Image: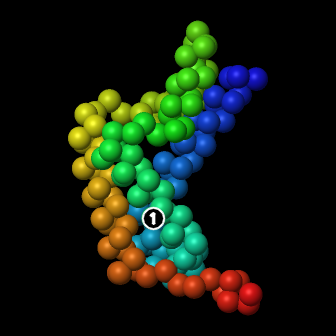
Amino acid sequence: MLVFIINLIIFSHFLIVLFITSLIFLIPIGYRFNWEIFKNKILRLLHLLLMTCVTLEAILGITCPLTSFESYLSGTLEEKTFISYWLGKIIYWNFPSLFFGILYSLCLAWIIIMWKIYPPKNNKVLKKF
């Protein structure tokens, strides 16, 4: 059961990384092809909020809660599973924290700039309420 929880945490972490990273590239492409999903204001707010949290964690030297929880739980296991090993290789890079602070700040700046270049639209569903 513990292995399942650890794998679930690291998989969730991977999905968040994938979400943030992919939208950095997909928003301009989506605007070019007029894909409405990338104009969704809630999606864009979530993207901005997550990148802001990641950037602040890096700048302030705070370990991500998902990383802390996964490390705490996996510290009780002798070996990693196949899934946690490879997702960990994708998520966790061995670079100085300054590198991540700069990288995340640049990504956050680009996301903010995209709000001007590719502004989100109000959701049609929310207008009905």
Image check: 128 left or right of 73? right
Q: Position of residue 34 (x, y in %)?
A: 51, 82
Q: Which residue sits furthest bottom? A: 128
Q: Position of residue 5 (x, y in %)?
A: 69, 30
Vertical placement of 109 versus 1: above or below?
below
Image check: 90 left or right of 110? right
Name the residue carrying label 1.
Answer: 48
Quadrant occupied by the C terminus:
bottom right
**Residue drawn at x 51%, y 69% as measured from the top left:** 45
**Residue drawn at x 39%, y 39% as measured from the top left:** 62
Q: Examine the image and state in which quarter residue 72 appears.
A: top right
Q: Is there any visible trace of residue 33 in the rendered image?
A: no
**How is the protein colored in the picture?**
rainbow
Q: Position of residue 91 (x, y in %)?
A: 45, 37
Quadrant occupied by the N terminus:
top right
Vertical placement of 69 versus 114: above or below?
above
Tag 1's secondary structure?
helix
Amino acid of disc 1: Leu
Looking at this view, is 33 or 103 the one in front? 103
Image check: 122 left or right of 23? right
Q: Is there any visible trace of residue 30 in the rendered image?
A: yes
Q: Examine the image and state in which quarter residue 70 appears.
A: top right
Q: Position of residue 36 (x, y in %)?
A: 57, 80
Vertical placement of 72 versus 14: above or below?
above
